[in-house]
Amino acid sequence: MRLIRGLSNLRRLKARADSPLRNGCVATIGNFDGVHVGHRTIIEQVKTRARDLGVPSLVMVFEPQPREFFQGNEAPPRLTGFRQKMEALREEGVDVVLCVRFDEQFRQYSGMGFIEDILIDGLGVRHLVIGDDFRFGCDRAGDFELLERVGQQEGYSVESTRTVEVRGERVSSTRVRQALQANRLREASELLGRPYAIGGRVVYGRQLGRQIGAPTANINLQRLAALRGVYVVRAELEDGRAFDGVANIGLRPTVDGRQPSLEVHLLDFTGTLYGQHMRVVFRHPLRDEIKFDSVDALKARIEQDFRDARTWLAAH
């Protein structure tokens, strides 16, 4: 899979004789947060049409996501970080990902400017798979009808995305997020098509866990996650090893309360993990995040969390 970061890199690539987009592409556009089963159906539509036309499949995403640009910290929590999203799209067999920076300059694109500069001149789009409620351009003036009308003139076709339902309801990133926030991990896994996980690189923390006898691998989070609390997890390391563990995800109200983080204690593990990339699979909720009156009270509850986790693991 080829990743193109930004419109300037797209233009430079398009000008090259060996550009993968020299004959155009079949594209779709969206956040693809979580890359859930609905997204996978869209990607399959794109790949099928791309094979028919003999051109690459392309997914266009945004950083930051539009709602993050407009709402800042009030935007809904992400399901996946950028690296996880790219890994998931690669696993789905996407040929090219175009990541566009969503900033004030991009926001000011008119609907026609977006179509002409990016879809036609930039991508040479031959076929577009898009939701019939998709809006784009300044003040969301562009819509499915405009794409179809211009496509008839410019020689590209437009196809609506298929709706995917699970248990009689449409699959969406919002629905996955709601399931996670309610700790319905099984439902979230069904919507995603895989267990929910967060990945990141292990960094140095405050060493408090080590001081109280519960050393943790710390992963900084840019934003609060959909999950919050203490969970039984499975931690998968980039060297291929995997360990059961207990994770706290949230704001650590007893000792910090400001920076979102994911702290993972690996059961029956000794060694160092700094610098390694870790994928944390959430398996079972243990309790909500609590602010304790003292570090000693926190230590006692963590020890109980470890016992509760081992009891659950022994039964599963």
Image (tube, rainbow, N blue to C red):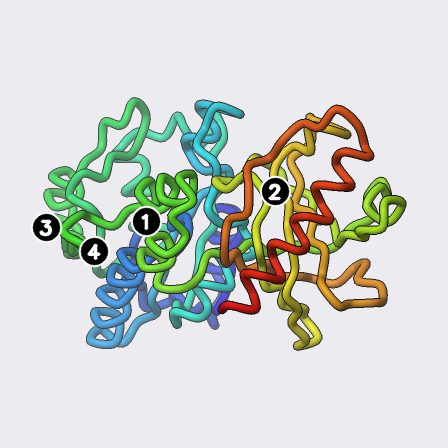
| Distance between the alpha carbons at the discs numbered 4 and 1 | 23 Å
Q: Which label sits on residue 249?
A: 2
Name the amino acid type tagged 2: Ile
Label 2 with label 4: CB-CB less than 8 Å: no
Q: Earlier in the sequence, mark 4 or mark 3?
A: 3
Kindly state the secondary structure of the residue where label 1 is placed: strand
Query: Which of the two discs, 3 and 2, sits closer to the camera?
Result: 2
Kindly state the secondary structure of the residue where label 4 is placed: strand
> How would you rate the neighbour count of disc 2 (Cα within 10 Å): few for under 14, some for 14-19, many for 20 or more?
many
Q: Is residue 43 left or right of residue 90?
A: left
Q: Earlier in the sequence, mark 1 or mark 3?
A: 1
Residue at the spot of label 1:
29
Q: Is residue 305 left or right of residue 86?
A: right
Q: Is residue 158 visible?
A: no
Q: Which label sits on residue 152?
A: 3
Q: Position of residue 249 (x, y in %)?
A: 61, 42
| Distance between the alpha carbons at the discs numbered 4 and 3 | 35 Å
Query: Which of the two discs, 4 and 1, sits closer to the camera?
Result: 4
Q: Earlier in the sequence, mark 4 or mark 1?
A: 1
Q: Which label sits on residue 159?
A: none
> How would you rate the neighbour count of disc 3 (Cα within 10 Å): few for under 14, some for 14-19, many for 20 or more?
few
| Distance between the alpha carbons at the discs numbered 1 and 3 | 19 Å
| Distance between the alpha carbons at the discs numbered 1 and 2 | 31 Å
Q: Earlier in the sequence, mark 3 or mark 2?
A: 3
